[in-house]
């Protein structure tokens, strides 16, 4: 049985957004609290503005894969925020919950020092669920490990 510590942070993500949560309950009965929400649309809008400012003398023949770009931008933003937050707040554990493709992008974006903090991964899409339900599913999944 794996238990969450009070210093555990949970990332719940999909292609559209990431929720950064912390555990304010116990290891057996987590109580999740929203720390930050990162939206892909905001990240792509920032990226699009900077791209429009660049010289467009080179034309590409292949259209951009915005779905893949969104996942990578989100994973990079989450990893950056987690690095900064760990330096400021010192979380000790990390749980990643995301669909398989997003989970893979998150794994790649995390620096090795943060990868060492990953307690568990859940390949599920839970961003639309209320926090108490996510906590319940997380506790259940960790109890089975």
Image (cartoon, grey):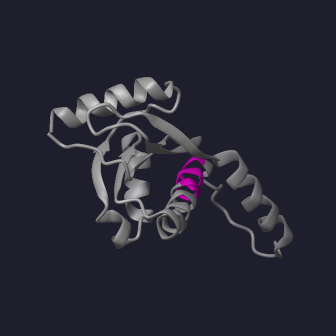
Q: Nearer the viewer, residue 95 or 23?
A: 23
Residue 141, percent across and down?
24, 33
**Numbered marks: total:** 0
Residue at point 38% right, 37% down?
Answer: 25
Occupied quadrant, residue 44: bottom right
* Quadrant (top left/top right/bottom left/bottom right) for the N terminus: top left
User: Is 145 part of what is drawn in magenta?
Assistant: no
Q: Residue at (26%, 33%) from the top-left corner? A: 28
Which region shows up in magenta?
Answer: 67-74
Q: Residue at x 76, y 59 (%)?
A: 46
Q: Nearer the viewer, residue 142 or 16?
A: 142
Which quadrant is the C terminus positioned in?
Answer: top left
Q: Is residue 73 rendered to the left or right of residue 31?
A: right
- Determine whether 86 is above or below 120 in the image: below
Left or right, residue 110 beside residue 59: left
What secondary structure prevails in the magenta region? Answer: helix
Comparing 103 with 69, the one in front is 103
How far from the left and from the top, in percent, is residue 110?
42, 65
Q: Quadrant of residue 116?
A: bottom left
Residue 102, horizontal then vertical, whole percent: 44, 47
Q: Picture coordinates of residue 8 (x, y %)?
A: 37, 50
Q: Is residue 141 above or below residue 133?
A: below
In the figure, 19 relative to 131: above or below? below
Q: Is residue 6 left or right of residue 130?
A: left
């Amino acid at each position: 049985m794996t238990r969450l510590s009070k210093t555990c942070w949970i990332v719940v993500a999909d292609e559209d957004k990431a929720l950064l949560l912390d555990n304010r309950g116990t290891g057996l009965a987590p109580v999740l609290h929203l720390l930050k929400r990162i939206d892909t649309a905001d990240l792509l809008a920032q990226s699009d503005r900077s791209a429009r400012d660049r010289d467009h003398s080179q034309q590409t023949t292949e259209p951009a894969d915005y779905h893949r770009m969104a996942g990578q931008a989100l994973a990079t933003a989450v990893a950056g925020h987690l690095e900064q937050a760990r330096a400021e707040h010192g979380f000790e554990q990390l749980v990643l919950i995301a669909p398989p493709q997003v989970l893979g992008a998150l794994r790649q974006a995390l620096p090795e020092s943060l990868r060492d903090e990953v307690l568990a991964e859940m390949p599920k899409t839970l961003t639309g669920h209320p926090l108490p339900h996510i906590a319940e599913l997380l506790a259940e999944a960790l109890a089975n490990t």
